[in-house]
Amino acid sequence: MRTPVQALNKKGSLRLYVRQRQLLALLDVLGGNAGNRDFQKLLFLYCKELIPTDQTSPYEFVPYRYGAFSFTCYADRRRLVDCGLLIDDRQHWTLTEKGKRIARETQDDSMRIFARRYHRLRGNALIAETYRKYPYYAIRSDIAEQVLKNDEAALSRIESARPEGTPSRLLTIGYEGRTLESYLNALLQASVTVLCDVRRNAISRKYGFSKNALARACDGVGIRYEHLPELGIESRQRRGLESQADFDALFRTYKRKSLPRQGDALAKIRAWLQLGESVALTCYERDANQCHRHCVADALGQILDQRGLFDQAAPHDTAEQNCTVRHL
């Protein structure tokens, strides 16, 4: 069992995000104890039903093996265990006495009303409720038919919620400004099958985006993760970039000196596309024009276009050639 770590601010109070306090408060109004799946589904319903549309939900979710799942929620759980606010129990969410005291500082009437509305709903009946109300989050469920018990209408809505499959194509995506869940949902909704990480060093201080964590998250939603560090740019070369002109100068050098030596890496991506995969190139920057991944996409576009294969790849405009790649 881990020893609690006290993370205090200057006034001696625990430093917690608002969402972490909301999580504790919700667990308290639900009785202070809940099984893993039950609490995950109740937190999901709370985020969907009680958060005003003009406010950001404390947690986002992805479709997972048992329905809606939040990676961030489980990261917060580890933090709250370390702070001595949750008991270290892998099967349950259980407040400590200290956790209860903090939870009661955040509770409100809407949480209590929510708890009364769902106080009898647990297990498969609770999971089925989430599937019926929010079918998109059941598209990867292993247990939909089991918990819906031949509810053909609900199963049909789940099938209709699946993003349409697409022909092989090339896309790019940056994770700047995205949560792990919103990033994964963007990939799923674009029918991406292979995420190709083109960072030189696939590490990040942003939760979920270091190599191993991102690979596990992708695997959980049915996307294959590949890392091609040879396509990256060393961090020292990116220092001091302040204007688009600075970025453009860096990318001209990259296309002239680095990319021509990466034929093997480009051939791997081309082969995935030829096998029918939808490939998304990923790096940090939200704006593809400030990220070298657009250079990689342009180089692939030229190769595919020359071989008469680009009609299998993607749609987006680039100023340098007629081929297209979609930037998510």
Image: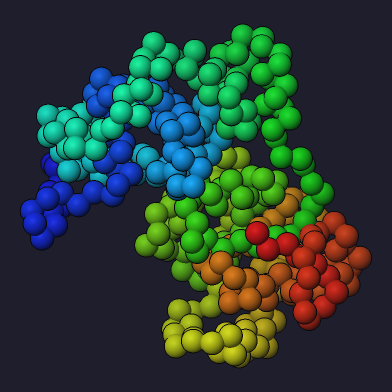
Taking depth in this image into account, of 252 and 189 the one nearest to the observer is: 189
* Residue 66 location (% of width, % of height): 51, 26
Taking depth in this image into account, of 74 and 203 the one nearest to the observer is: 74
Q: Quadrant of the C terminus?
A: bottom right
* Residue 4 location (% of width, % of height): 14, 42
* Residue 295 location (% of width, % of height): 68, 76
Residue 62 in view, yes or no: yes
Q: Residue at x 77, y 56 (%)?
A: 169
Q: Quadrant of the N terminus?
A: top left
The answer to which image quadrant residue 188 occupies is: top right
Q: Residue at x 53, y 78 (%)?
A: 233
Q: Is residue 316 above or below residue 137?
A: below
Colour option used = rainbow
Taking depth in this image into account, of 227 and 111 the one nearest to the observer is: 111
Q: Is residue 51 above or below residue 118?
A: below
Q: Is residue 41 above or below residue 71?
A: above
The answer to which image quadrant residue 82 occupies is: top left
142 horizontally vs 321: left or right: left
Q: Residue at x 52, y 60 (%)?
A: 175
107 horizontally vs 207: left or right: left
54 horizontally vs 39: left or right: right
Residue 65 in view, yes or no: no
Residue reaching furthest left?
A: 12
* Residue 34 location (% of width, % of height): 31, 21
Q: Is residue 295 above or below residue 46?
A: below
Q: Residue at x 71, y 16 (%)?
A: 153
The answer to which image quadrant residue 114 occupies is: top left
Label count reads 0
